[in-house]
Amino acid sequence: MSQQTKYLLHENQMPRFWYNLQADLPKPLPPVLHPGTMQPVGPDDLAPLFPMALILQEVSLEREIEIPEPVRDVFQLWRPAPLFRAHRLEKALGTPAKIYYKYEGGSPAGSHKPNTAVPQAFYNKEAGVKRLVTETGAGQWGTSLAFAGSLYGMEVEVFQVRVSYDQKPYRRAVMETYGARCFASPSTQTAYGRSVLAKDPHHPGSLGIAISEAVELAVQRDDTKYALGSVLNHVLLHQTIIGQEAMLQMEMADAWPDVVVGCTGGGSNFAGIAFPFIGHGLRGGPKPRIVAVEPAACPSLTRGKYAYDFGDTGHMTPLTKMHTLGSQFTPPGFHAGGLRYHGMAPLVSHVKELGLMEAVSYNQVECFEAGVLFARHEGIVPAPEANHAIKGAIVEALRCKAEGKSETILFNLCGHGHFDMTSYQKYFAGELTDEHYDEAELAMALAGLPSVPEPV
């Protein structure tokens, strides 16, 4: 096998259905609750935020949901995405392990996020929606929704967490190129943003705050809906095209993973690569170890509490049961902005509670070290978020070396780092340091979790 070997699928082999893991789980996902009544929400409760097609996907228990043909037509701009064998990295590590990675950085936005941005924009357009509002951390989701909105002639407004807004100005420029408007959050555009700034004019922002701002605007106009880039079931569903392609490509390579690794913030790219393999195992196939890698500065899976919580800081969203650090928790401003979210996707959290996956956390500097090592041997400069997955894969490869095992490792390289070079400049200058959350703030945020009665 050549070191340059790349496994591609013909466009006719692109998956025609999204895979819904809920159909195969041994225990159902806890219900989403209305914060006022503490009763499960219904479609009418979600209608101000989402079109009915997405609400039905959110609650579906069907194993397969068809990808609309117009969406598949757009996907052909970059899908099927390639699977690579990391021969040079293997050699550099001196490991007997075989390392494969699914590369999602070839999309127009440079990450996996258009996999859900395009269908979300499509379904909203079909429902007559004129404007989409959203939040973004590092800017990959905002960029992706801006791209999708441009395809369907829709207005897009993005609230970007201020620390990332300042760190990554080129992401903002790309959003504007696609026709979107981007605001630093907390902003003066919303009542909630103004209330946060009144208390702290220099607040660094958080995804929870940005979500509150976007939701506030979404419910004010009938022609406006909210779009989310991670966390929700329908978002994770759309990303499963990644793992389904990877399964076909691994078979073409006459290989199958013993370990599947993905970085986790809200859970979308991790679910995209991992859920199809988990489901395959639940249906009687081989069961690889599934490893989620999160930042040590925002460790919802490894330090958070599994409890009902709000998805936003302003408490405008329903309550979902998830691993959470508390909706009032503000993560420090480390450079993997896409991983700075206080909670983990309810479905990913549920999978962890069922014992179907593991979670580990690493610090910022060691993840950049891994990303630089990868770039120098494989040629792709990864996004800071993806560096966490690379770190996890390297740890697994070195474990194989120590144990003398020739295991196969698959990880998701969810995006390139071309708009994150300021972070790399800081790393090479020795100015990038490990960020640490405030233990007292975490304790206070967890103490403030909403009180939800146990089901009878």
Image (cartoon, helix red, strand yellow):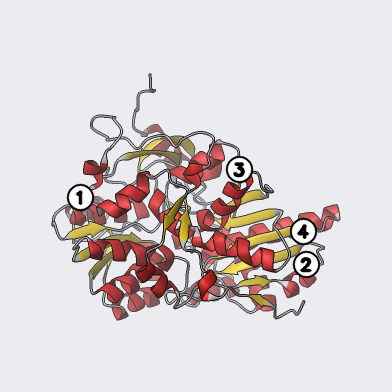
**Which mark is in front, 1 or 3?**
3
Disc 1 crowd, CA 10 A, few/some/many (<14, 14-19, 20+): some
Residue type marked 1: Pro
Contact between marks 4 and 3 (CB within 8 A): the answer is no
Q: Of helix, strand and loop, which one carries label 3?
A: helix
Quote the CA–CA distance across marks 2 and 4.
7 Å
Residue 90: x %, y % from top left: 76, 69
Q: Which mark is residue 93?
A: 2
Disc 4 crowd, CA 10 A, few/some/many (<14, 14-19, 20+): some
Between disc 2 and disc 1, whose residue precedes?
Answer: 1
Disc 3 crowd, CA 10 A, few/some/many (<14, 14-19, 20+): some
Quote the CA–CA distance across marks 1 and 4.
49 Å
Residue 10: x %, y % from top left: 56, 75
105 vs 301, nearest the viewer: 105
Residue type marked 3: Leu
The residue that appears at 74% across and 75% down in the rendered structure is 88
Residue 165: x %, y % from top left: 35, 68
Between disc 1 and disc 3, whose residue precedes?
Answer: 1
**Quadrant of the snapshot with the C terminus:** top left
Q: Which residue was labeled with disc 4?
A: 398
**Which mark is in front, 2 or 1?**
1
Q: Which mark is residue 414?
A: none
